[in-house]
Image (tube, helix red, strand yellow):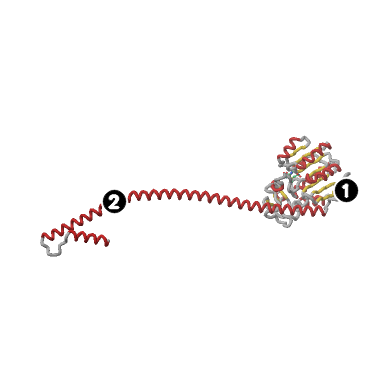
Amino acid sequence: MESIDHPSEGQPLLLHSLAEFEELILSCLEIADARSVVEIGAEDGLFTRRLLPWAERHGATLFTVDPAPRPPLLELAAEYDAVDLIEERSLDALQKLDPADVYLVDGDHNYYTVLHELQTIDKHAGEVERPYLVVLHDVSWPSARRDMYYAPDTLPADAVHPYSFDRGVVPESARAVTGGFRGEGEFGFAVDEGGPENGVLTAVEDFMADHDNLELRLVPAVFGLGFVFAKDAPYAGKLRSLLDPYHLNPLLERLERNRVQLFLRVLELQDAVTAVTRHRDDIELMLRDADVQNRALWARNAELEAELDKEVDRRARLAKPLEQLMREVDMVARSRAFQLAEGASRAAHLVGWSGTTLSSARLRDAIAAVEREH
Ligand SMILES: C[S@@+](CC[C@H](N)C(=O)[O-])C[C@H]1O[C@@H](n2cnc3c(N)ncnc32)[C@H](O)[C@@H]1O
């Protein structure tokens, strides 16, 4: 998961690798006097790196099977001859590999894959009558009773439960939820927990039910570690002595439950921060859009103001000659009216009109009076 690395210290925030069981597993390899080990599912090679010195010291062969090895594992395989990297799915690789003394099974955590891994290992070991020890990761929550799929398309369709790569899981809900523990696109979980043929522990139990010559020990820590070995294996007694104190240990169970709850709380808070950050980013984007629009509006405003100023100037330029013209027209009209009035007065006097004669002075007064009224 993306969130399991602590960014500031480079330490895993959530312990999740077989590497956390280093002492226990290496002690089992010693007890079983392993000469050949097959590691299924190696991811970054965290545990491969721990196995290497042991294998070199004991002259043991180490096959590491992973169809999608990550760069650190590829570098490790390139650097050390002792790692034989097989880039295939476990069920294909197991068909070709010779039976080994010990198998570390931590690949695709679903019922179909795990059951067939166990059956194949058992069949091949039976053919050469060789005891084997299988160490299986993820026999506790979340994969104990719920399939997890790296590549569901590679499995038979009727072996795959309805699943989701987006939804996550929490211990309180049998149904996958929004949020919770999830694979961030790397793997998906079955939507429903429980029921037949679902989960790693269910596969182990169904396999054990058909093999009463085998024993199972379960260490309920760091997602759970299972040990399957023959009751009559020469090392069975020593393995029991080593593993029994851990087997379904209630203190370990409580610590594991608490660890999971704390991590889920971290995920919850992380999701809340992500949601707030996304909201803040949306708002920032909207503000940036609004700013761009605002600037465009201010620019248009400035353009319009400039156009308005130009229009006012143009009108002012046109108004001056117009006023002058009006004044001239007015003056011409007045002097013409005065001339007409004087002419009329004189004509009336000449023809001996007996009515009141209009002197030019009275005529001017009359015009001035009219002008005042208007
Ligand atoms: C949980 S990680 C293994 C972690 C590693 N064992 C450790 O403890 O550090 C699971 C790995 O299994 C690989 N895987 C997925 N499907 C597989 C398959 N069918 N066979 C083998 N490996 C598989 C994935 O590519 C992934 O690297």
* Residue 23 in which image quadrant: top right
Query: Which label's residue is closer to the chain start, 1 or 2?
Result: 1
Q: Look at the numbered disc 2 and give the secondary structure of its residue.
A: helix
- Residue 344 as seen in the image, left or right of residue 66: left
Label 2 packing within 10 angstroms: few (<14), some (14-19), many (20+):
few
- Residue 344 as seen in the image, left or right of residue 174: left
| Camera-side residue of 274 and 345 | 345
Q: Which residue is mark 2?
A: 324
Q: Which residue is mark 1?
A: 241
* Residue 254 in which image quadrant: bottom right
Above/below status of 291 relative to 341? above
Label 1 packing within 10 angstroms: few (<14), some (14-19), many (20+):
few
Q: Position of residue 194 (x, y in %)?
A: 75, 55
In the image, what residue type sits under mark 1? Ser
Q: Quadrant of ligand 1?
A: top right
- Say the numbered circle drawn on residue 58: none
Q: Position of residue 164 (x, y in %)?
A: 68, 51
| Camera-side residue of 253 and 88 | 253
| For the residues bearing labels 1 and 2, Cβ distance under 8 angstroms | no
Q: Position of residue 327 (x, y in %)?
A: 27, 53
Q: Position of residue 341 (x, y in %)?
A: 18, 58
Establish whether ligand 1 lies closer than 8 Å to the Cβ of label 2.
no
Look at 71% across and 50% down and name the residue there: 160
In the image, what residue type sits under mark 2? Gln
- From mark 1 to mark 2, how far is it between C-alphas? 123 Å
| Camera-side residue of 175 and 152 | 175
Look at 33% across and 49% down and name the residue there: 318
Outermost front residue: 361
Residue 126 in sight here: no
Above/below status of 362 relative to 29? below
